[in-house]
Amino acid sequence: MSVTKSPLSEIISISDLPWQERQPGIRMKSLWEDAATKRRAVLSRIEPDATPPLHRHVGDELIFVIEGALSDEFGTVTAGSMGYRPNGCVHTISTKQGATVLAIITGSVEPIAQRVAGPPSQVFTLSDLPWVETRPGVRQKKIWDDPAGEGRRAILARFEPGATLARHRHVGDELIFVVEGANADESGPVTTGNMNYRPNGCIHTVTTKNGATVLAVVWGRTEAL
């Protein structure tokens, strides 16, 4: 009788990936992609006063500003905060001093010649959101839930030194970006500025020696084992 092994998480070492110039003043790193669901993670470096064209989102996008600030017609997302661009959002983006941005995209974007109506983007100032203790040594900030109710959500989690997430299974998948510190599972350590992809069916235990702050974008749920 064959035994089916659960998939391991995948460590994405961002510094090892090459920059690609998208247009003058904008470079990108392709971090992760799931072609079947048209989902991908991209790191962008936007130089001061770069001028991306007017565009429309076909699908949606969550962004986390790692450094600098990024503005559009609806507000400014500063370092350490997030923005959401819903399906149909039409906008231009700009940055006065430059920005480094992590984007989790579902679908695509398309340039358009003239402005048309569309839903506004949103800004989530993470420092304004409360921490909620979810288990001993682990606190979370609930940032965003998919308005379509498809189980997608974005969470900021803080793990105190020595905190552990007991062995669990992912029902649906998850991307995490380590903002500060490091955590580890059976695939190895994920350090500051890097990512971990937990595929559907992944079974693992998460630990941190000295603490970690992580941004998680989740599709689905987890179940204890």
Image: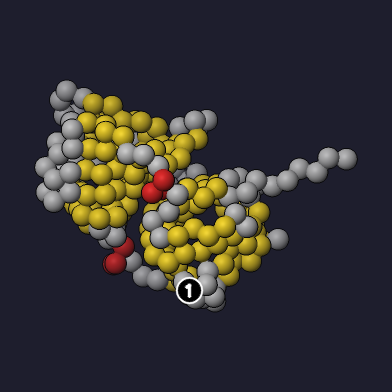
Instruction: Identify which residue is drawn at 46% across, 40% down.
Output: 32
- Secondary structure state at the residue bearing disc 1: loop
Relative to residue 147, is residue 222 drawn left or right?
right
In this view, 131 is above or below 68? below
Instruction: Identify which residue is drawn at 25% across, 44% down.
Output: 45
Residue 124: percent from left, percent from top: 29, 56
Instruction: Identify which residue is drawn at 60% across, 54% down.
Output: 187
In this view, 26 is above or below 129? above
Front residue of this view, candidates 210 and 174: 210
Instruction: Identify which residue is drawn at 34% across, 36% down.
Output: 87
Residue 223: percent from left, percent from top: 64, 57
Front residue of this view, candidates 28 and 129: 28
Residue 123: percent from left, percent from top: 26, 53
Tell me if I can see residue 93 in this picture. Answer: yes
Front residue of this view, candidates 27 and 201: 27
Q: Residues within 10 Å of mark 1 (few under 14, many from 20)?
A: few
Relative to residue 177, is residue 198 drawn left or right?
right
- Quadrant for the N terminus, please: top right
- Quadrant for the C terminus, please: bottom right
Residue at which label 1 appears: 210
Relative to residue 146, is residue 205 drawn left or right?
right
Tell me if I can see residue 155 in this picture. Answer: no
Residue 119: percent from left, percent from top: 26, 39
Front residue of this view, candidates 143 and 17: 17
In this view, 27 is above or below 165? above
